[in-house]
Amino acid sequence: MMSVKHTRLSVLAVAAVLLASAQSHAAIALDRTRVIFNGAEKSVSLNVSNLNKELPYLAQGWIEDQNGEKMSSPLVVLPPVQRIEPGDKSQVKIQALPPIAALPQDRESVFYFNLREIPPRSNRQNVLQIALQTRIKLFYRPEAIYASQTDLTNPWQEKITLTRRGDHYEVHNPTAYYVTIVDALSGLGGKSLNGFSPLMVAPKSQGTLGLSASALGSAPVLSYINDYGGRPQLQFSCSGTECRVTKTAAGN
């Protein structure tokens, strides 16, 4: 019994090492960490690269809804599967279909773009092959609220407010856009606070920060992700239970 147990542990350990190794050597790479789909356009193209210089890979793409369910409308990936030669580059197109008009036109909608890399079949025996997958947020931004340069210069994320309820802060998002808070810090340019969980707040909605209000302090500093993948920082000033953004920093 002892040898069987040790064998199982060894197999699990080897599998974990192989998985970690595979994840650190992903072949298919995207050119971004999120997709902003302009409602005024019929499609958006993403650049895809095969970083492996020796082997061709298949790249399989699809869209999921907020619940993780695959969908074929109102957005579709073209081509759904393609072969990318060693060291080569290609494009994936996300195409809007007519039912896109049924989505809310006064606020963003969120979906998830998935890209799976499929390695060529190995000629060697007893080789573990893993199909790695990238999953990023896809925001459909209707033409009526598409962000202008003025909006990007004066970020809508700075309009969010906090309300203290007991020992937690509730985030209020009055804007038409999703706001993704990814970090809490000890101060502008400070260190990350342990135990913080990212929070995505839907348009004209609210959500509760997982970290306690006592840990965040009386002048909370939060970091969000902007359209370009940057992480600007917001410092709040509180009066009673209500807090508003008073200072900002570029972040990283």
Image (cartoon, helix red, strand yellow):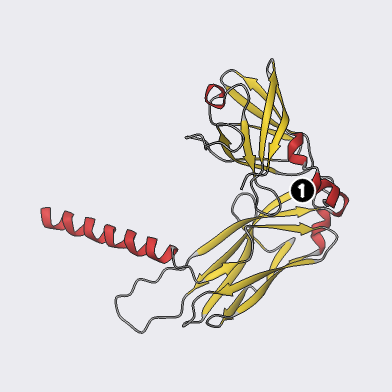
Q: Which residue is mark 1?
A: 108
Residue depicted at 66% across the width and 71% down the height:
47
Left or right: where 163 falls relative to 197: right
Left or right: where 160 falls relative to 231: right
- The answer to whether any part of residue 1 appears in the image is no
Between residues 114 and 151, which one lies in front from this camera angle? Answer: 151
Answer above or below: position of 146 versus 205. Answer: below
Residue depicted at 61% across the width and 57% down the height:
136
Residue depicted at 22% across the width and 59% down the height:
10
Answer above or below: position of 98 versus 49. Answer: above
Between residues 138 and 80, which one lies in front from this camera angle? Answer: 138
Q: Which image quadrant for residue 181? A: top right
Q: What amino acid does circle 1 point to? A: Glu
Image position, residue 33 (x, y; %):
62, 58
Image position, residue 3 (x, y; %):
12, 57
Image position, residue 240 (x, y; %):
69, 15
Residue depicted at 64% across the width and 49% down the height:
66
Answer above or below: position of 164 versus 250. Answer: above
Between residues 184 and 137, which one lies in front from this camera angle? Answer: 184
Instruction: Return the residue found at the far right.
Output: 144
For the residue labelled by badge 1, is the local secondary structure a helix, a strand or a loop?
loop
Q: Which image quadrant for residue 180? A: top right
- The answer to whether any part of residue 21 appears in the image is yes
Q: Which image quadrant for residue 216? A: top right
Instruction: Return the residue found at the far top.
Output: 240
Between residues 165 and 185, which one lies in front from this camera angle? Answer: 185
